[in-house]
Image (spheres, grey):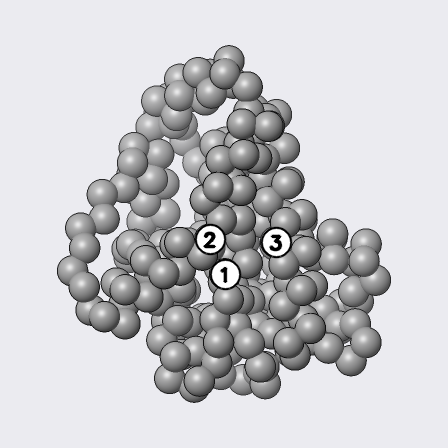
């Protein structure tokens, strides 16, 4: 599995780093890649509101108690087989600090909260929402067989988004993020961190727009 995709078009490069959200060791892996790349702007797969919250938490050293929901707790319990898990995602925190220290602007590349709410209503029906709630309650009994964190994150994604409406919602997210990355490229070379389960779909959509893997 590729750690870092390098896409190029018209002399501009986008480095796309896949990360496993929540795994503490991902911070070191992210920094190892970022420090060895020359880029003008950073990108992170969160909404603008989430990025502002992360900045306040990390840069202003505000103590906030983050209470995960039930699926997040189950995810963390299973991910814990591969190392320490914490919130907010350590890779996000490390990259934010790195960009801040080096004077690199960090841009959110995911949908904002209003856009996400509209997309959710468009793709997920009321019956699917009810079915999803029942499925989430059964996740605690599911046995995940992956033997590494990346494969687990992908296996988890398939389990949590098994219903078509939720799959369509994630495909739509990938489309939005890919468009935002292409807009970001107008500012120069960029380095972007995105959860591993979304990366392949995003890269595929960018290839459709004539971006080439280097």
Sequence-first tag of 3 and 2: 2
As measured in the structure, the alpha-carbon distance from the residue carrying label 3 to the one carrying label 2 is: 10 Å
Q: Position of residue 84 (x, y in %)?
A: 28, 57
Label 3 with label 2: CB-CB less than 8 Å? no
- Residue ranking furthest to the front: 114
Q: Nearer the viewer, residue 191 or 155?
A: 191
Q: For marks 1 and 3, give the CA distance.
A: 9 Å
> Depth check: 77 or 128 in front?
128
Which one is earlier in the sequence, the residue at label 1 or at label 3?
A: 1
60 relative to 45 in the view: left or right: left
Q: Which residue is mark 1?
A: 108
Residue at numbered disc 3 = 177
Residue 37 is left or right of residue 200, and the answer is left
Q: Quadrant of residue 14?
A: bottom right
Q: Residue 95, which numbered label?
A: none
Residue shown at 63% from the left, 68% from the top:
184
Mark before the other along the chain sequence, 1 or 2: 2
Q: Which residue is mark 2?
A: 47
Quarter of the view holding residue 9:
bottom right
Label pair 1/2, CB-CB below 8 angstroms: yes
In what element is the residue under mark 2?
loop
Residue nearest the observer in this picture, 29 or 116 = 116
The alpha-carbon separation of the residues under discs 1 and 2 comes to 6 Å
Up/down of 161 relative to 60, above or below: above
Say which residue appears at 23% left-offset and 70% top-offset: 60
Task: Decide: few, some or many residues near mark 3? Use Cα within 10 Å; few <14, some 14-19, many ≥20.
Answer: many
Relative to 172, is 53 above or below?
below
């Amino acid at each position: 599995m590729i750690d870092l995709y390098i896409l190029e078009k018209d002399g501009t490069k986008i480095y796309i780093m896949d990360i496993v959200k929540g795994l503490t060791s991902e911070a070191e892996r992210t920094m190892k890649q970022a420090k060895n790349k020359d880029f003008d702007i950073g990108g992170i797969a969160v909404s603008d509101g989430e990025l502002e919250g992360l900045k306040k938490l990390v840069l202003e050293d505000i103590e906030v108690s983050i209470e995960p929901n039930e699926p997040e707790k189950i995810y963390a319990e299973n991910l814990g087989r591969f190392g320490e898990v914490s919130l907010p995602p350590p890779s996000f925190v490390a990259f934010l600090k790195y960009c801040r220290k080096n004077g690199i602007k960090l841009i959110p590349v995911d949908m904002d909260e209003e856009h996400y709410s509209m997309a959710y209503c468009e793709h997920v029906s009321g019956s699917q929402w009810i079915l999803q709630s029942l499925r989430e309650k059964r996740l605690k009994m599911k046995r995940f067989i992956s033997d590494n964190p990346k494969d687990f994150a992908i296996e988890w994604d398939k389990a949590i988004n098994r219903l078509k409406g939720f799959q369509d919602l994630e495909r739509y997210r990938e489309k939005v993020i890919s468009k935002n990355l292409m807009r970001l490229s107008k500012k120069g070379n960029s380095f972007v961190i995105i959860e591993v389960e979304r990366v392949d779909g995003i890269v595929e959509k960018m290839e459709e727009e004539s971006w080439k893997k280097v």
